Image (cartoon, rainbow, N blue to C red):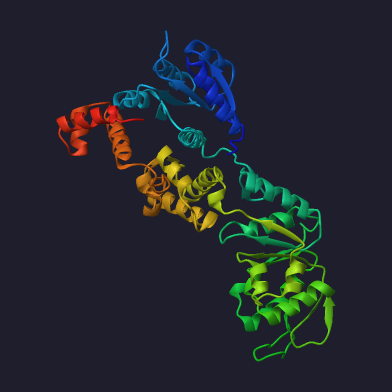
């Protein structure tokens, strides 16, 4: 439940409420401040940067609605969540119009509180990202972009691997950036001035892989009209990157194991070996240990490769890295196309961040390239995204709410979108004003 010590201010004239909320949110690893009224809250706001303010609606002297309005006008990086023991749809509409991101009715459970706080803070991060200029520098490490905890661990592992000479196994789903990690290791090492030779083991026919890796002599097989060096010769003094090593046959695995053990290669058709000084980096998107148990991958080769292992996390687990990468690719492809760099709407960013990204960074890169090519407007909206992403945020809301709760929320959103105009809201909802009034009244009378 760690929240990275994000700062939250709770404003309520009830000492008991302040105590309970502070205890619960502090236990959830937030940094919590409290204020018994609006005046005290404003003093804290002026002295301390805050990510979120949770305020009661009805308080003596100055109301919570006035505080929401003050924060909206003066502290754009601070989000607001309103809580109240007197819930109403009109109150929710006014709070949202004034600047609150969430409206929570008392009494509420701890789960409801934590869920609402997480939603608001997630929105806050998206809002801040939307204000980042597309050409602003993003955290990068030798071509790898990210500031998430998972990528920070990858950067540390790359740094340690770069100063060693051991074999490195890089694992991760397709499209996560395994080759970029391998390049980062090579170009941060003492071998950086020597060749980096990438080889896609799965893309070379089995009958040609040995010749491609180790070379062949003239007459070694039909078509071998001249001797030719292999990838290991080309990488001498540098690094060879064996991508998708799990696709290598057992027979080729034996020959690669011999190279790892003896540091020698033998060209196809020759009985003479040659010493090579090559560091081997390997990568796979499969579970090599599982393949070993199935007898598909040699155990001795697995342990030779498994000296240092770097796991690249999937994009869906990298949080705000999705937004950093989206802005990076947006700037890159706009420059390549000779276009002014467009920007994303908050809702488009939220959809990008909520999507599962089965194709990882490669899929994100392709999506952004398509948007730059196909979109003529300065602002990229949700409607411009591929259909699978337009509804990703809706899919992630879960199915734990009652039909009445969903209906009430939708009515509130429609009313907010038309500034509380019931006639217009009734038209959008496809009902008459009387039915709308009855639904609003029923929602206000329903238990929280």
- In this rendering, would 152 be left or right of 417? right
Quick check: can you spot residue 145? yes
Task: Classify residue 246 by image quadrant.
Answer: bottom right
| Marker count (numbered) | 0
Q: Is residue 45 above or below residue 349?
A: above
Residue 86's image quarter? top left
Residue 373 pos. (x, y %):
42, 52
Eyeballing the image, is 197 above or below 361?
A: below
Question: Percent position (x, y) of residue 220?
Answer: 72, 89
Is residue 199 visible to us here? no
Q: Is residue 426 above or below residue 330?
A: above
**The C terminus appears in which quarter of the rendering?**
top left
273 relative to 184 in the view: left or right: right
The residue drawn where x is 82% and y is 73% is 261
Where does residue 386 sit, x and y in percent of width and height?
39, 53
Look at 64% across and 56% down and name the residue there. 180
**Direction top: furthest residue:** 61
Q: Quadrant of the N terminus?
A: top right
Which residue appears at 60% of the width and 64% of the height? 285
Give the percent coordinates (x, y) of residue 388: 39, 54
In-front residue for pair 144/250: 250
In this picture, is 99 found above or below 268? above
- Which residue is depicted at the point 20% across and 30% down? 438
């Amino acid at each position: 439940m760690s929240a990275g010590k994000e700062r939250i201010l709770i404003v309520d004239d009830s000492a008991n409420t302040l105590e309970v909320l502070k205890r619960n949110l502090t236990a959830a690893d937030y940094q919590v401040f409290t204020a018994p009224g609006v005046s005290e809250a404003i003093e804290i706001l002026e002295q301390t940067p805050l990510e979120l303010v949770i305020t009661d609606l009805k308080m003596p002297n100055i109301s919570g609605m006035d505080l929401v309005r003050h924060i909206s006008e003066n502290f754009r990086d601070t989000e607001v969540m309103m809580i109240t023991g007197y819930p109403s749809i009109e109150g929710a509409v006014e709070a949202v119009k004034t600047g609150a991101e969430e409206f929570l009715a008392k009494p509420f459970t701890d789960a409801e509180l934590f869920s609402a706080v997480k939603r608001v803070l997630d929105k806050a991060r998206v809002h801040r990202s939307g204000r980042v200029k597309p050409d602003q520098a993003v955290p990068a490490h030798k071509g790898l972009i990210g500031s998430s905890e998972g990528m920070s661990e990858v950067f540390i592992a790359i740094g340690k691997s770069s100063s060693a000479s051991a074999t490195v196994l890089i694992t991760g789903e397709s499209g996560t950036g395994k080759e970029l990690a391998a390049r980062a290791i090579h170009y941060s090492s003492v071998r950086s001035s020597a060749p980096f030779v990438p080889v896609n083991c799965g893309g070379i026919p089995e009958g040609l892989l040995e010749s491609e890796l180790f070379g062949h002599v003239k007459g070694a097989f039909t078509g071998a009209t001249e001797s030719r060096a292999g990838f290991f010769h080309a990488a001498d003094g540098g690094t060879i990157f064996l991508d998708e090593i799990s696709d290598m046959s057992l027979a080729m695995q034996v020959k690669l194991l011999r190279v790892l053990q003896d540091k020698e290669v033998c060209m196809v058709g020759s009985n003479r070996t040659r010493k090579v000084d090559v560091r081997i980096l390997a990568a796979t998107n499969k579970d090599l240990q599982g393949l070993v148990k199935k007898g598909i991958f040699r155990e001795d080769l697995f342990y030779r490769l498994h000296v240092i292992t770097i796991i690249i996390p999937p994009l869906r687990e990298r949080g705000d890295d999705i937004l950093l990468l989206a802005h990076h690719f947006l700037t890159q492809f706009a420059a390549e196309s000779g276009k002014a760099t467009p920007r994303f709407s908050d809702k488009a960013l939220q959809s990008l961040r909520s999507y599962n990204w089965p194709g990882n960074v490669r899929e994100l890169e392709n999506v952004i390239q398509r948007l730059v090519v196909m979109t003529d407007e300065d602002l990229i909206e949700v409607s411009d995204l591929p259909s699978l992403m337009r509804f990703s945020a809706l899919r992630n809301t879960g199915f734990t709410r009652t039909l009445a709760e969903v209906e009430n929320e939708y009515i509130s959103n429609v009313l907010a979108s038309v500034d509380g105009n019931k006639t217009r809201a009734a038209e959008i909802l496809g009902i008459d004003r009387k039915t709308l009034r009855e639904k609003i009244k029923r929602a206000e009378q329903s238990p929280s």
